Amino acid sequence: MALQQAARICRTCDPLEGGDFPVKERFHRFHPITDKTKGKRKVKALLKSNIFYGWFIVGAAFFIMALGWGSVYNASSIFIQPITKELGFTRSEFNVTLTIKAVCLLVVSLLAGKIYSRFNIMKVMKVFSVTLVLSFYLYSFASTLLMFYAITIVVSTSLSLIAILPLSIILSNWFVKGRGSAIGMAFMGSGVGGMILSSLTGIWIQNYGWRVAYQFLTVLMAVFILPGVFLIIRTQPSHMGLKPYGITEESAETYRTAENEGIMLKDAFRSVIFWAVNLATVCLNIAINGLMLNVAPHLTDIGYSITFSANVVALIMGSLAIGKAAFGKLYDTIGLKATILIACMANIIALTGVIFSRSYIGLAVTVIFVGVGCAYGTIASSVLANDLFGKKDFNAIYGFLTAIGGVGSILNPIIYGFLYDNSGSYISSYLLSIVLCVVALFIFLAIFARKKPVPALN
């Protein structure tokens, strides 16, 4: 509480915001925060609480991931069978929407540095949160493949511009201490949303049809996403007269220095470590997507019922939700190197378990370890960009790492489809994924042997 009160000072008295007072006199007085700084009435009420305001942003981010990512990605597979059956599409034709989603995320990620340096992040999020809700609603009226493809382009682009990329940037601005935990808790929303929405969507489709199910999901999006974007989320703590979580009088100067540390993206292109990180991320994303997207058909192929397979997927989604929070906590507690290596090992163990999934023990091993391992896919790029390359050009470097990771998502269905068609099983694909995880593990061992992360504030 003391830190919260001490942080709420006028920006004109803050040396980190260009004020005239030296650091040692920074907390000499407190100023009331104006209506303009507070924003809307709801934000005023939140500021009066004893809870650091950044945690409310974590909560808003959680619901964006739960309703946005949960609807667009994690619950999307529930629609495949009823849509293709009713409209006469083949699975391969309709599954082009999966490739479109991956390509849109890749393109947005590549342009993230330019987008967020030219345009205000909050204005972008406000525009595209509305676009997301309206375009997702249009799914309920789609009747041709071209309509589904066109809507998917708009939906995926809109989600990419309000979800993982901007939320990681914003949460990194708000949290110095506990950054990993904040990002992990926010992003576990996609797993929680996937669990709940997949179940609800199945019920809605069965009782009302897939078009009505899209409409119900749209209503939930509007109710939970729009208020968070328009009323709660703010880009910088300084915009509200606050300091990042973990900044004290003693660490203020160190924080200001750290904000200017690091390299630019153009300089990163000449770094062997930068491309090594990208290669490891592609390897892991191929493995992660292969495990997450193909476990259900693999289980039905080896004799489990559809209902049982769906329950296993639900458990995996729950494990992923917990794993994201655990990944963030591990990062805050034991550091980047140990956390990344644990994630690599967890993926190897989870993939080994699914290979032996005819046994319940194998399934249990997969469910236990898949969470922390697959959390790499959504959280790692942010902490790698921050710790290895600094804050100086964080937006551009983080966007590029995310985009290259998206290449793995695009390659995965091609590789897995080819191996499945030639072997009639997913076992060969899982074996390849284990090899890729081992390659990534050794790449990171080499990276951490050569490069020390940018010093973190404790």
Image (cartoon, grey):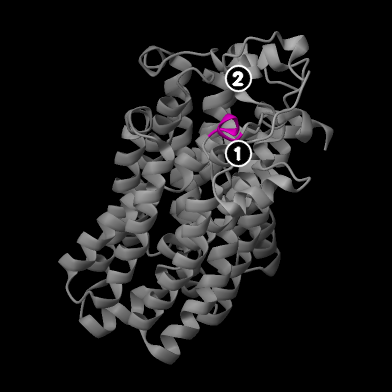
Where residue 147 sits: x, y (%)? 18, 67
Q: Is residue 324 magenta?
A: no
Where residue 338 sits: x, y (%)? 70, 30
Q: CA distance from mark 2 to mark 1?
A: 46 Å
- Give the magenta-colored segment's residue range: 236-240
Q: Residue beneath label 1, please?
A: 344
Look at label 2 and name its amino acid.
Answer: Thr
Q: Residue beneath label 2, please?
A: 12
From the viewer's perspective, tell me whether residue 458 is left or right of residue 188: right
Among numbered discs 2 and 1, the one appearing first in the sequence: 2
Vertical side of 355 occupied by 182: above or below: above
| Disc nearest the viewer among 2 and 1 | 2
Q: Nearer the viewer, residue 179 or 202?
A: 179
Where residue 204 sits: x, y (%)? 46, 84
Label 2: how many Cα within 10 Å (few below 14, some 14–19, many 20+): few
Which quadrant would residue 135 be assigned to in this image? Answer: bottom left
Q: Give the dominant element type of the magenta stretch: helix, strand or loop.
A: helix
Residue at 29% x, 40% y: name it. 107
Label 1: how many Cα within 10 Å (few below 14, some 14–19, many 20+): many
Q: Nearer the viewer, residue 115 or 319?
A: 115
Vertical side of 65 occupied by 196: above or below: below
**Residue 28 in view here:** yes
> Where does the C terminus fall, quadrant-wise?
top right
**Residue 324 in view here:** no
